[in-house]
Each structure stands twice: as structure tokens, then as C-alpha cells.
């Protein structure tokens, strides 16, 4: 089956007054129809830049250094704004962390959804309004006929995020990028939004790229997980493989820092140090200086992706047949045996 999205060796840089910043480095991945792929990593690892490079929403200071972006079988790597405009909404859509960056505070919610529908579909105003009401109902807004005429300030944070989802889904896109869509919400509302995304995926068959730094959220929603560090994917696999059998030391560190995995009366683990400044990327493995299991080669040569299974791979020299056998942190052994 042909992927709905495919990235081939994608690298994205920014030109700054201090030099070139390598934000995304040699990323390859694919997304299947109806799949939810989670992008995970610390702030600044390249998750949002990668998704916005696909949407062509990056500033003019950015540029694609190499690679290809293939959407629904079409190479859009060199697409300009005029070519991208009809794709946004109808093929590609995005939901951001703060719904008020999307919603106009002065215009009724229903009208904003209707405008999105009319922009991408040849419908009458009446038909577009009916579709907008259906979208409000789809995302779980009760009494859509009444809510249609209300401005965003009448809605709670969770309801606003549902309205943004209605706008994003109004033209039946094939791919939805959800960039930290639940971070600003309380736990109860967060769970409802996650359930809503799963329900919408099941009803529409849409493919979702879910961007987050919250591994608990990712475990609940994702089919596959790609972990990014310093602009590169360092591990990718099914959710079960990445959570129950992680192979990269960075992923060990992320897992060990999950509060629910900390043993009773033990101190919560942290990853020492900070991610590198990408004005001057390290020569070898970017995680080496923070990695207690680093080998000498980590400081000299970037590791390739080693295949763990047909669906699971990781970029760490510890998977080389010549590397010493390392026992993962005890907290991960508890997780795997629970």
C-alpha cells in the first residue's frame, strides 16, 4: 500500500545572523492511511519544524537542504505558496497547541468553519452551513445549532480545541498534523480530546501525525512512535516496541523520567545536560555527551539506523555486533515485566 506521506532524507535549515541552524537532519519516514504516528522528543528537537516544512509554513529564512516530501504520491518538495494553498485544508491540515492562534475572537465559530468549507468545496452557503453543523456534532459540540452563532470566548479551552478540529477536518483532509493539541488542557479534557481523535480516525480513515513530548499521551493514542533528538530520528517502531523494548539510550532516559515508572520512594530520573546547539552540530552522535553508555566511536562517527525488527530500528552504536552488551536502566526492566 502506498503511504499517504513519505519523507526521504529530509534536511531543513535556517539561515540566522549567527550562521546556519540545522533543524531537521536526514529524516526518512512514512505514514500509512488511517495510521497515527507520534513524533516525540524534547523541545527544540525538530518535531514542529519537520511538520511545518511539509505544510510549507516555515519563514523565508528556512530552506530544504536535501530530500523529498511526497504527499499522496505527489512530490511537493519544490511547491510554492500558490501550489500549496489548495492542498492546505483539502489534503493537509494542522491543529496547533493554542486554539486561539487559529480562531478569530470576533467571528462566530460556525462562520469560521463555514468559511473553511466554502474555500475548499463547491457548495452553496446553505450547504456549507449544514456541513459546519455536522462538523460541530462530529467533534462533540452539543447543541450545534445554538453554538454555531457564538464567538470563541463563550467556549472553554477544550471546546475551542474541538472547534479548531472541526475547522481542520471540514474539508476531509487525508493527513492531520496535531502539534501538542492537548498540552494546555487539564487531564480530564485531554483524555476526551485523545478519545475524539481516535474516534475521528476510525470514522474518517484520516492519517494523523501527533506531535508531543508527553509519553503518557503518546502511549494512549499512537500506532507507531518516532523519537527525535537534535533534528534526527533516533528510534522508530510500533508503540509497543518503543515503550516495551527501547534500544536507544535517549529513549531509556525519556522512559526513566516518566513519573508513573518511578519506583516507590525513588527519585525521579533526569537526563543530564542539554541538547546541543545546532549552529555547530557534534561530529558524532549528538546524544553522546549526555549518554552514560557512550562508546568512543559515538564521539567520532554518527551511528546509522540499525534494524531491530522489520518495524523497529534505532540509531545507536550499542546495536553494532561489536558493541558491549548493556543492561537498560532498572526502571525499564520493571516496565517491561509489568
Image (cartoon, helix red, strand yellow):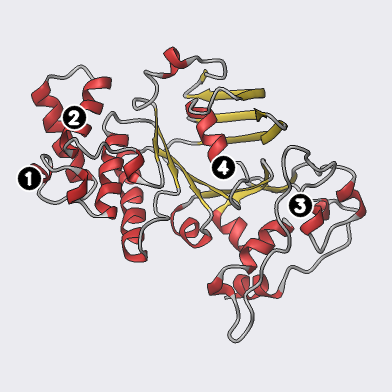
* Tag 1 near tag 4, CB within 8 Å: no
Q: Is 93 or 147 nearer to us in this picture? A: 147
Marked residue nearer the N-terminal end (1 or 4):
4
In 3D space, how far apart are the residues under numbered discs 3 and 2 (Cα atoms)? 47 Å
Query: Does residue 215 appear anywhere in the picture?
Result: yes
**Disc 1 to disc 2, how far (Cα)?**
15 Å
Any mark on residue 146, and which?
A: 1
Distance of label 1 from label 3 (alpha carbons): 53 Å
The residue singled out by tag 4 in the image is: 47
Residue 2 % position (x, y): 51, 28
What residue is pinned by disc 3?
A: 287
Query: Considering only order in the chain, which callout, 3 or 1, is on the residue closer to the N terminus?
Result: 1
Asked if residue 240 lies left or right of residue 221, the reply is right
Q: Residue at x 36, y 38 (%)?
A: 205
The label on residue 114 is 2
For label 1, the crowd category at 10 Å Cα-Cα, with few meaning under 14, some 14 to 19 and many 20 or more, is few
Image point (49%, 50%), residue name: 223
Q: Is residue 87 above or below residue 26?
A: above
Viewport quadrant of the C terminus: bottom right
Q: Secondary structure at mark 4?
A: helix
Q: Which type of secondary structure does the marked residue at label 3 adopt?
A: loop
Q: Earlier in the sequence, mark 3 or mark 2?
A: 2
The residue located at (28%, 54%) in the rendering is 158
Could you say whether the residue bearing mark 1 is in a helix, strand or loop?
A: helix
| Residue 176 relative to residue 158: left or right | right
Distance Cα–Cα, label 4 vs label 2: 30 Å
Query: Is there any visible trace of residue 2 in the rendered image?
Result: no
Disc 2 crowd, CA 10 A, few/some/many (<14, 14-19, 20+): many
Amino acid at each position: 500500500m502506498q503511504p499517504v506521506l513519505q519523507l526521504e532524507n529530509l534536511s531543513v535549515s535556517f539561515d540566522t545572523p549567527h550562521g546556519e541552524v540545522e533543524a531537521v537532519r536526514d529524516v526518512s519516514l512514512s505514514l500509512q492511511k488511517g495510521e497515527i504516528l507520534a513524533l516525540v522528543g524534547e523541545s527544540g528537537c525538530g518535531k514542529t519544524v519537520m511538520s511545518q516544512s511539509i505544510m510549507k509554513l516555515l519563514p523565508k529564512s528556512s530552506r530544504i537542504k536535501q530530500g523529498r516530501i511526497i504527499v499522496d504520491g505527489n512530490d511537493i518538495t519544490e511547491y510554492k505558496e500558490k501550489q500549496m494553498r489548495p492542498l492546505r485544508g483539502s489534503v493537509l491540515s494542522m491543529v496547533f497547541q493554542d486554539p486561539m492562534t487559529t480562531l478569530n475572537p470576533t467571528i462566530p465559530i460556525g462562520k469560521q468553519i463555514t468559511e473553511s468549507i466554502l474555500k475548499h468545496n463547491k457548495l452553496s452557503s446553505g450547504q456549507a452551513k449544514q456541513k459546519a453543523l455536522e462538523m460541530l456534532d462530529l467533534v462533540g459540540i452539543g447543541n450545534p445549532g445554538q453554538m454555531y452563532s457564538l464567538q470563541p470566548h463563550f467556549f472553554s479551552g477544550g471546546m475551542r480545541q474541538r472547534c479548531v478540529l472541526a475547522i481542520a477536518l471540514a474539508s476531509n483532509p487525508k493527513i492531520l498534523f496535531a502539534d501538542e493539541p492537548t498540552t494546555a488542557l487539564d487531564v480530564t479534557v485531554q483524555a476526551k480530546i485523545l478519545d475524539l481523535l481516535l474516534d475521528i480516525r476510525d470514522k474518517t480513515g484520516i492519517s494523523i501525525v501527533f506531535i508531543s513530548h508527553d509519553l503518557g499521551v503518546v502511549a494512549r493514542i499512537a500506532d507507531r512512535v518516532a523519537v527525535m533528538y537534535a533534528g534526527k530520528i533516533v528510534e522508530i517502531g510500533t508503540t509497543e516496541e518503543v515503550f516495551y523494548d527501547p534500544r536507544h539510550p535517549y529513549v531509556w532516559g525519556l522512559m526513566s523520567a516518566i513519573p508513573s515508572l518511578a519506583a516507590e520512594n525513588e527519585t525521579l530520573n533526569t537526563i543530564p545536560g542539554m541538547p546541543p546547539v545546532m549552529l555547530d552540530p557534534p561530529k558524532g552522535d549528538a546524544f553522546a555527551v549526555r549518554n552514560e553508555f557512550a562508546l568512543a566511536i559515538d564521539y567520532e562517527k554518527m551511528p546509522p539506523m540499525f534494524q531491530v525488527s522489520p518495524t523497529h530500528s534505532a540509531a545507536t552504536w550499542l546495536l553494532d555486533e561489536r558493541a558491549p552488551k548493556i543492561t537498560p536502566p532498572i526502571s525499564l526492566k520493571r516496565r517491561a515485566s509489568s
